Image (cartoon, helix red, strand yellow):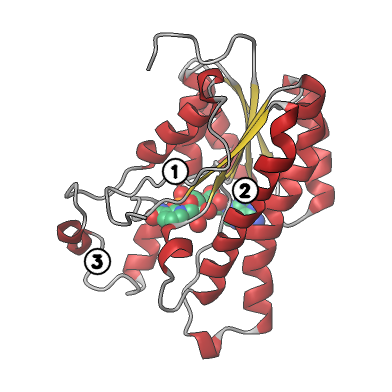
Protein backbone atom coordinates (compact mmCIF):
# COMPACT_ATOMS: atom_id res chain seq x y z
CA UNK A 1 0.00 0.00 0.00
CA UNK A 2 1.01 3.59 -0.53
CA UNK A 3 0.98 4.72 3.11
CA UNK A 4 -1.91 7.03 2.17
CA UNK A 5 -5.02 6.80 4.34
CA UNK A 6 -7.64 4.60 2.69
CA UNK A 7 -10.07 7.52 2.42
CA UNK A 8 -9.73 11.28 2.57
CA UNK A 9 -13.03 11.53 4.45
CA UNK A 10 -15.12 9.29 6.74
CA UNK A 11 -16.81 6.44 4.91
CA UNK A 12 -19.65 4.07 5.68
CA UNK A 13 -19.65 0.60 4.15
CA UNK A 14 -22.36 -2.00 3.79
CA UNK A 15 -21.16 -5.59 3.50
CA UNK A 16 -23.88 -8.14 2.76
CA UNK A 17 -23.61 -11.66 4.12
CA UNK A 18 -20.98 -10.43 6.57
CA UNK A 19 -22.06 -12.53 9.52
CA UNK A 20 -19.65 -15.22 8.36
CA UNK A 21 -16.75 -16.20 6.10
CA UNK A 22 -15.53 -13.80 3.42
CA UNK A 23 -18.03 -11.09 4.34
CA UNK A 24 -17.00 -11.09 7.99
CA UNK A 25 -13.29 -10.81 7.07
CA UNK A 26 -14.13 -7.96 4.68
CA UNK A 27 -16.15 -6.09 7.29
CA UNK A 28 -13.30 -6.47 9.79
CA UNK A 29 -10.74 -5.15 7.30
CA UNK A 30 -12.86 -2.19 6.19
CA UNK A 31 -13.38 -1.24 9.83
CA UNK A 32 -9.66 -1.58 10.54
CA UNK A 33 -9.05 0.91 7.71
CA UNK A 34 -11.48 3.33 9.40
CA UNK A 35 -14.83 2.78 7.69
CA UNK A 36 -18.02 2.47 9.75
CA UNK A 37 -19.46 -0.90 8.77
CA UNK A 38 -23.05 -2.08 8.45
CA UNK A 39 -23.09 -5.87 8.75
CA UNK A 40 -26.06 -7.22 6.83
CA UNK A 41 -26.93 -10.90 7.04
CA UNK A 42 -30.07 -13.00 6.71
CA UNK A 43 -29.02 -14.47 10.06
CA UNK A 44 -29.62 -11.53 12.40
CA UNK A 45 -27.76 -13.16 15.32
CA UNK A 46 -24.61 -13.64 13.29
CA UNK A 47 -24.91 -10.05 11.99
CA UNK A 48 -25.05 -8.75 15.56
CA UNK A 49 -22.19 -11.02 16.69
CA UNK A 50 -20.03 -9.84 13.76
CA UNK A 51 -20.78 -6.19 14.55
CA UNK A 52 -19.82 -6.84 18.18
CA UNK A 53 -16.55 -8.46 17.02
CA UNK A 54 -15.74 -5.39 14.90
CA UNK A 55 -16.58 -3.05 17.77
CA UNK A 56 -14.44 -5.06 20.21
CA UNK A 57 -11.53 -4.72 17.78
CA UNK A 58 -11.91 -0.91 17.96
CA UNK A 59 -14.12 -0.34 14.90
CA UNK A 60 -17.59 1.08 14.40
CA UNK A 61 -20.33 -1.30 13.27
CA UNK A 62 -24.01 -2.17 13.39
CA UNK A 63 -25.48 -5.59 12.64
CA UNK A 64 -28.85 -5.89 10.89
CA UNK A 65 -30.97 -8.83 9.76
CA UNK A 66 -31.41 -8.41 6.00
CA UNK A 67 -32.42 -10.91 3.35
CA UNK A 68 -30.95 -9.43 0.17
CA UNK A 69 -33.71 -11.11 -1.82
CA UNK A 70 -36.22 -8.80 -0.08
CA UNK A 71 -36.11 -5.31 -1.61
CA UNK A 72 -38.40 -3.71 0.94
CA UNK A 73 -36.15 -4.94 3.78
CA UNK A 74 -33.09 -3.61 1.91
CA UNK A 75 -34.69 -0.15 1.69
CA UNK A 76 -35.67 -0.25 5.36
CA UNK A 77 -32.22 -1.36 6.51
CA UNK A 78 -30.58 1.27 4.33
CA UNK A 79 -32.62 3.97 6.09
CA UNK A 80 -31.41 2.55 9.44
CA UNK A 81 -27.81 2.65 8.25
CA UNK A 82 -28.20 6.26 7.08
CA UNK A 83 -29.52 7.36 10.45
CA UNK A 84 -27.00 5.36 12.52
CA UNK A 85 -23.79 5.66 10.46
CA UNK A 86 -24.51 8.17 7.67
CA UNK A 87 -24.96 7.52 3.93
CA UNK A 88 -23.18 4.43 2.65
CA UNK A 89 -20.74 5.03 -0.17
CA UNK A 90 -19.02 1.62 -0.06
CA UNK A 91 -20.99 -1.54 -0.86
CA UNK A 92 -19.64 -5.08 -0.96
CA UNK A 93 -22.25 -7.50 -2.30
CA UNK A 94 -21.05 -10.75 -0.81
CA UNK A 95 -24.22 -12.51 0.39
CA UNK A 96 -24.64 -15.71 -1.53
CA UNK A 97 -25.83 -19.28 -1.48
CA UNK A 98 -23.90 -21.96 -3.33
CA UNK A 99 -25.94 -25.15 -3.61
CA UNK A 100 -24.92 -28.22 -5.60
CA UNK A 101 -27.46 -30.21 -7.64
CA UNK A 102 -27.38 -32.20 -10.85
CA UNK A 103 -28.67 -30.10 -13.75
CA UNK A 104 -31.71 -32.32 -14.36
CA UNK A 105 -32.66 -32.16 -10.67
CA UNK A 106 -32.60 -28.36 -10.31
CA UNK A 107 -36.20 -27.32 -9.74
CA UNK A 108 -37.73 -24.04 -10.83
CA UNK A 109 -37.78 -23.07 -7.13
CA UNK A 110 -34.06 -23.94 -6.69
CA UNK A 111 -33.19 -21.85 -9.73
CA UNK A 112 -35.36 -18.92 -8.65
CA UNK A 113 -33.92 -18.78 -5.11
CA UNK A 114 -30.30 -18.84 -6.30
CA UNK A 115 -31.06 -16.08 -8.79
CA UNK A 116 -33.02 -14.09 -6.17
CA UNK A 117 -30.17 -14.08 -3.65
CA UNK A 118 -27.02 -14.07 -5.78
CA UNK A 119 -28.07 -11.97 -8.77
CA UNK A 120 -31.26 -10.04 -7.94
CA UNK A 121 -29.93 -9.39 -4.40
CA UNK A 122 -26.82 -7.80 -5.88
CA UNK A 123 -28.94 -5.78 -8.33
CA UNK A 124 -31.28 -4.50 -5.60
CA UNK A 125 -28.52 -3.56 -3.17
CA UNK A 126 -26.68 -1.66 -5.93
CA UNK A 127 -29.86 0.12 -7.03
CA UNK A 128 -30.85 1.02 -3.45
CA UNK A 129 -27.43 2.34 -2.42
CA UNK A 130 -26.36 4.09 -5.66
CA UNK A 131 -28.37 7.32 -5.06
CA UNK A 132 -26.31 8.13 -1.93
CA UNK A 133 -23.11 7.47 -3.88
CA UNK A 134 -24.31 9.69 -6.71
CA UNK A 135 -25.16 12.43 -4.21
CA UNK A 136 -21.65 12.13 -2.73
CA UNK A 137 -19.99 12.08 -6.17
CA UNK A 138 -17.99 9.08 -4.90
CA UNK A 139 -18.72 5.41 -4.48
CA UNK A 140 -17.13 1.98 -4.45
CA UNK A 141 -19.03 -1.20 -5.26
CA UNK A 142 -17.37 -4.62 -5.12
CA UNK A 143 -19.47 -7.58 -6.20
CA UNK A 144 -18.42 -11.08 -5.20
CA UNK A 145 -18.85 -13.50 -8.08
CA UNK A 146 -17.18 -16.93 -8.28
CA UNK A 147 -14.54 -18.64 -10.37
CA UNK A 148 -17.36 -21.00 -11.40
CA UNK A 149 -18.73 -18.10 -13.47
CA UNK A 150 -15.44 -18.17 -15.42
CA UNK A 151 -15.06 -21.94 -15.76
CA UNK A 152 -18.49 -23.44 -15.13
CA UNK A 153 -18.90 -26.17 -12.53
CA UNK A 154 -20.59 -29.55 -12.49
CA UNK A 155 -23.75 -29.58 -10.39
CA UNK A 156 -23.70 -25.78 -10.11
CA UNK A 157 -25.44 -24.66 -13.32
CA UNK A 158 -27.82 -22.37 -11.43
CA UNK A 159 -25.09 -21.01 -9.16
CA UNK A 160 -22.57 -20.41 -11.96
CA UNK A 161 -25.25 -18.71 -14.06
CA UNK A 162 -26.16 -16.38 -11.19
CA UNK A 163 -22.51 -15.50 -10.59
CA UNK A 164 -21.89 -14.93 -14.32
CA UNK A 165 -24.87 -12.56 -14.22
CA UNK A 166 -23.11 -10.62 -11.48
CA UNK A 167 -20.22 -9.99 -13.88
CA UNK A 168 -22.47 -8.62 -16.66
CA UNK A 169 -24.41 -6.51 -14.16
CA UNK A 170 -21.23 -5.07 -12.66
CA UNK A 171 -19.60 -4.23 -15.98
CA UNK A 172 -22.77 -2.42 -17.07
CA UNK A 173 -22.91 -0.45 -13.83
CA UNK A 174 -19.23 0.42 -14.15
CA UNK A 175 -20.03 2.12 -17.45
CA UNK A 176 -23.20 3.83 -16.28
CA UNK A 177 -21.96 4.98 -12.86
CA UNK A 178 -18.34 5.77 -13.74
CA UNK A 179 -19.14 9.38 -14.71
CA UNK A 180 -20.63 9.85 -11.20
CA UNK A 181 -17.37 8.95 -9.45
CA UNK A 182 -18.46 5.39 -8.66
CA UNK A 183 -16.35 2.34 -9.45
CA UNK A 184 -17.82 -1.15 -9.76
CA UNK A 185 -15.55 -4.18 -9.73
CA UNK A 186 -15.93 -7.92 -9.43
CA UNK A 187 -13.98 -10.38 -7.27
CA UNK A 188 -14.57 -14.03 -8.22
CA UNK A 189 -13.09 -16.19 -5.43
CA UNK A 190 -12.05 -19.80 -5.75
CA UNK A 191 -11.65 -22.24 -2.89
CA UNK A 192 -11.70 -20.00 0.13
CA UNK A 193 -11.77 -21.71 3.51
CA UNK A 194 -15.14 -20.63 4.92
CA UNK A 195 -18.08 -22.37 6.61
CA UNK A 196 -19.73 -22.67 3.17
CA UNK A 197 -16.69 -24.41 1.64
CA UNK A 198 -16.35 -26.79 4.59
CA UNK A 199 -20.07 -27.55 4.35
CA UNK A 200 -19.73 -28.42 0.64
CA UNK A 201 -16.73 -30.65 1.45
CA UNK A 202 -18.59 -32.43 4.25
CA UNK A 203 -21.51 -33.07 1.88
CA UNK A 204 -19.04 -34.72 -0.51
CA UNK A 205 -19.23 -32.13 -3.29
CA UNK A 206 -15.50 -31.38 -3.35
CA UNK A 207 -14.00 -34.76 -4.23
CA UNK A 208 -11.55 -35.93 -1.59
CA UNK A 209 -11.94 -32.73 0.42
CA UNK A 210 -10.61 -29.21 0.63
CA UNK A 211 -6.93 -30.06 1.18
CA UNK A 212 -6.89 -32.43 -1.82
CA UNK A 213 -7.21 -29.37 -4.10
CA UNK A 214 -3.98 -27.79 -2.85
CA UNK A 215 -1.79 -29.67 -5.35
CA UNK A 216 -3.77 -28.20 -8.26
CA UNK A 217 -3.42 -24.68 -6.85
CA UNK A 218 -0.25 -22.93 -8.07
CA UNK A 219 0.40 -21.16 -4.74
CA UNK A 220 -0.14 -24.50 -2.94
CA UNK A 221 -2.58 -23.48 -0.27
CA UNK A 222 -6.31 -23.04 0.27
CA UNK A 223 -7.50 -19.43 0.14
CA UNK A 224 -8.36 -17.55 3.29
CA UNK A 225 -11.27 -15.12 3.74
CA UNK A 226 -8.64 -12.42 4.35
CA UNK A 227 -7.29 -12.94 0.80
CA UNK A 228 -10.63 -11.78 -0.58
CA UNK A 229 -11.03 -9.08 2.06
CA UNK A 230 -7.68 -7.52 1.06
CA UNK A 231 -8.74 -7.27 -2.58
CA UNK A 232 -12.12 -5.79 -1.64
CA UNK A 233 -10.53 -3.21 0.65
CA UNK A 234 -7.99 -2.21 -1.98
CA UNK A 235 -10.75 -1.73 -4.57
CA UNK A 236 -12.68 0.40 -2.06
CA UNK A 237 -9.78 2.78 -1.35
CA UNK A 238 -9.54 6.28 -2.80
CA UNK A 239 -6.42 5.29 -4.70
CA UNK A 240 -8.25 2.56 -6.66
CA UNK A 241 -10.41 5.14 -8.44
CA UNK A 242 -9.07 4.31 -11.92
CA UNK A 243 -9.98 0.62 -11.63
CA UNK A 244 -13.53 -0.15 -12.70
CA UNK A 245 -15.44 -2.85 -14.55
CA UNK A 246 -12.64 -5.32 -13.80
CA UNK A 247 -12.77 -8.95 -12.79
CA UNK A 248 -10.04 -9.28 -10.16
CA UNK A 249 -9.38 -12.99 -9.71
CA UNK A 250 -8.22 -13.96 -6.22
CA UNK A 251 -7.71 -17.68 -6.55
CA UNK A 252 -4.07 -18.69 -5.96
CA UNK A 253 -3.68 -19.14 -9.71
CA UNK A 254 -6.38 -21.82 -9.98
CA UNK A 255 -8.05 -19.84 -12.77
CA UNK A 256 -5.96 -17.71 -15.12
CA UNK A 257 -7.96 -15.87 -17.78
N1 LIG B 1 -15.75 -19.87 -0.18
C1 LIG B 1 -15.47 -19.99 -1.45
O1 LIG B 1 -14.60 -20.77 -1.84
C2 LIG B 1 -16.21 -19.17 -2.47
C3 LIG B 1 -15.88 -19.38 -3.82
C4 LIG B 1 -16.54 -18.64 -4.78
C5 LIG B 1 -17.48 -17.69 -4.42
N2 LIG B 1 -17.78 -17.51 -3.11
C6 LIG B 1 -18.80 -16.50 -2.80
O2 LIG B 1 -18.37 -15.70 -1.72
C7 LIG B 1 -19.50 -15.26 -0.97
C8 LIG B 1 -19.30 -15.56 0.50
O3 LIG B 1 -19.19 -16.96 0.64
P1 LIG B 1 -18.62 -17.68 1.95
O4 LIG B 1 -17.84 -18.82 1.47
O5 LIG B 1 -18.02 -16.68 2.88
O6 LIG B 1 -20.02 -18.23 2.52
P2 LIG B 1 -20.62 -18.31 3.98
O7 LIG B 1 -21.80 -19.21 3.86
O8 LIG B 1 -19.58 -18.59 4.99
O9 LIG B 1 -21.14 -16.82 4.17
C9 LIG B 1 -22.22 -16.34 3.44
C10 LIG B 1 -23.05 -15.44 4.34
O10 LIG B 1 -24.15 -14.95 3.56
C11 LIG B 1 -25.32 -15.01 4.35
N3 LIG B 1 -26.49 -15.08 3.48
C12 LIG B 1 -26.96 -16.15 2.78
N4 LIG B 1 -28.08 -15.82 2.13
C13 LIG B 1 -28.33 -14.51 2.42
C14 LIG B 1 -29.35 -13.61 2.06
N5 LIG B 1 -30.38 -13.99 1.28
N6 LIG B 1 -29.28 -12.33 2.51
C15 LIG B 1 -28.29 -11.95 3.32
N7 LIG B 1 -27.30 -12.77 3.73
C16 LIG B 1 -27.33 -14.04 3.27
C17 LIG B 1 -25.15 -16.25 5.20
O11 LIG B 1 -25.99 -16.25 6.35
C18 LIG B 1 -23.66 -16.19 5.53
O12 LIG B 1 -23.41 -15.48 6.72
C19 LIG B 1 -20.72 -15.94 -1.59
O13 LIG B 1 -21.36 -15.05 -2.48
C20 LIG B 1 -20.12 -17.11 -2.34
O14 LIG B 1 -20.90 -17.52 -3.42
C21 LIG B 1 -17.17 -18.23 -2.13
State which tag comes first along the sequence, 1 or 2.
2
Residue pointed to by mark 1: 248
**Residue plotted at (33% across, 68% down):** 202
- Give 233 or 175, whichever is nearer the viewer: 175
Q: Quadrant of the C terminus?
A: bottom left
Alpha-carbon span between mark 2 and mark 3: 34 Å
Residue pointed to by mark 3: 209
Q: Is residue 195 visible?
A: no
Alpha-carbon span between mark 3 and mark 1: 26 Å
Image check: 112 left or right of 3? right
- Give 245 or 188, whichever is nearer the viewer: 245
**Residue plotted at (46% across, 9% down):** 4
Image check: 219 left or right of 245? left
Q: Residues within 10 Å of mark 2 (few under 14, many from 20)?
A: some
Give the percent coordinates (x, y) of residue 167. 57, 54
Which of the 4 image quadrants contains residue 204? bottom left
Q: Residues within 10 Å of mark 1 (few under 14, many from 20)?
A: some
Disc 1 under 8 Å from ligand 1? The reply is no
User: Which dot, 2 or 3, sits closer to the camera?
Assistant: 2
Residue pointed to by mark 2: 171
- Give 2 or 189, whichever is nearer the viewer: 2
Which of the 4 image quadrants contains residue 241? top right
Q: Residues within 10 Å of mark 3 (few under 14, many from 20)?
A: some
Considering every residue shown, the one lying at the far bottom of the view is 104
Disc 2 under 8 Å from ligand 1? The reply is no
Amino acid sequence: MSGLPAWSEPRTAIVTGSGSGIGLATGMRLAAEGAAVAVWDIDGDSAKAAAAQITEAGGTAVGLAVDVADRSRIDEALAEVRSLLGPATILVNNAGISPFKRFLDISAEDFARVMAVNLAGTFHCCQAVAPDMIAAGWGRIVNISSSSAQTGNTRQAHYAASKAGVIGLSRSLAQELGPKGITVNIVPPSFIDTPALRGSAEAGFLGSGVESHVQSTPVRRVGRPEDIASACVYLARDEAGFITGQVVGVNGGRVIV
